[in-house]
Image: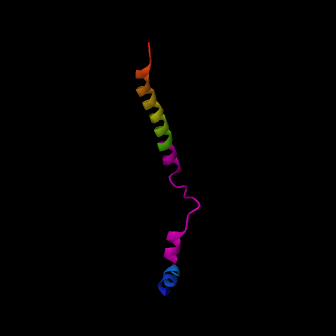
Amino acid sequence: MSHLHALAAQPAVTELLAVSKDDTGPGVVLRTVLIVGVVGIAFLAWFLLRGYKKD
């Protein structure tokens, strides 16, 4: 267990584990993927269901 305390005492390790305030994560990319996915699903549903339209 002492090796964990020695590891935590290293400043480089604490810098790597620290979360930056400027780190916003995959926000923009994830939002774009979700919007494109929803629009794609709606388009696919419209495309498949238009064949069931009765004249």
Image quadrant where one finds the C terminus? top left
In this rendering, the answer to whether 13 lies above or below 30 is: below
User: How far from the left and from the top, in percent, is residue 32?
Assistant: 49, 43
Q: Residue at x 41, y 27 (%)?
A: 48
Residue 7, x across and y down, in percent: 48, 81
Magenta residue span: 10-32
Q: How many marks?
A: 0
The residue sitting at 52% across, 45% down in the picture is 31
Q: Residue furthest right?
A: 21
Residue 12 belongs to the span the image colors magenta: yes
Q: How is the image coloured?
A: rainbow
Residue in front for this viewpoint, 40 or 52:
52
Location of residue 18 in the rendering, given as x and y in whole percent from the top left corner: 55, 68
**Magenta stretch encompasses residue 18:** yes
Outermost residue toward the bottom in this view: 2
Q: Residue furthest top?
A: 55
- Residue for point 47% across, 43% down: 33
45 over 55 or under it: above or below: below
Nearer-the-camera pick, 7 or 45: 45
Residue 46 to residue 15: above or below: above
Residue 26's place in the image compared with 4, above or below, is above
- In the depicted view, which residue is nearer to us: 5 or 54? 54
Q: Position of residue 51 (x, y in %)?
A: 40, 22
Question: Closer to the camera, 4 or 14?
Answer: 4
